[in-house]
Image (spheres, helix red, strand yellow):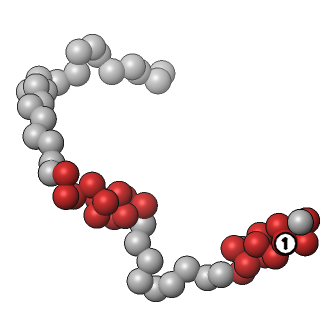
Amino acid sequence: MEAEARLILRDALVKKPSDDSQNLAEIIREHMAPLGGVELELPPRHGPDREPPTFD
């Protein structure tokens, strides 16, 4: 069983990602796209709520 685990780990570490591989965000987007999107109403931004810190 240990030898099999070593083979699995070695194979996983040796494989190089293919050129057509997608990043995680693209994979999730493809998976979730059939469910539709979400439109969020964002409140307007008026500027900072407080004075920015000074680093004197």
Q: Residue furthest front?
A: 1
Horizontal relation, residue 55 to residue 28: left or right: right
In the image, what residue occupies the spot 12% across and 35% down?
A: 40
In the image, what residue occupies the spot 22% across and 21% down?
A: 48
Q: Where is residue 4 in the image (x, y as percent from the top left)?
A: 84, 72
Q: In this view, does 10 lie above or below 23?
A: below
Q: Position of residue 7 (x, y in %)?
A: 81, 76
Horizontal relation, residue 2 to residue 40: left or right: right
Q: In which quarter of the image is the N terminus?
A: bottom right
In the image, what residue occupies the spot 29% across and 16% down?
A: 51
- The quarter of the picture where residue 3 lies is bottom right
| Numbered disc total | 1
Q: In this view, does 7 lie above or below 42?
A: below
Q: Where is residue 18 in the image (x, y as percent from the top left)?
A: 51, 84
Whether residue 43 can be seen here: yes
Which residue in the structure is indicated by mark 1?
4
Residue type, mark 1 in image: Glu
Pick the residue in front: 12 or 49: 12
Q: Which residue lies furthest to the top in this view?
A: 50
Pick the residue in front: 13 or 3: 3
Which element is circle 1 on? helix
Pick the residue in front: 49 or 34: 34
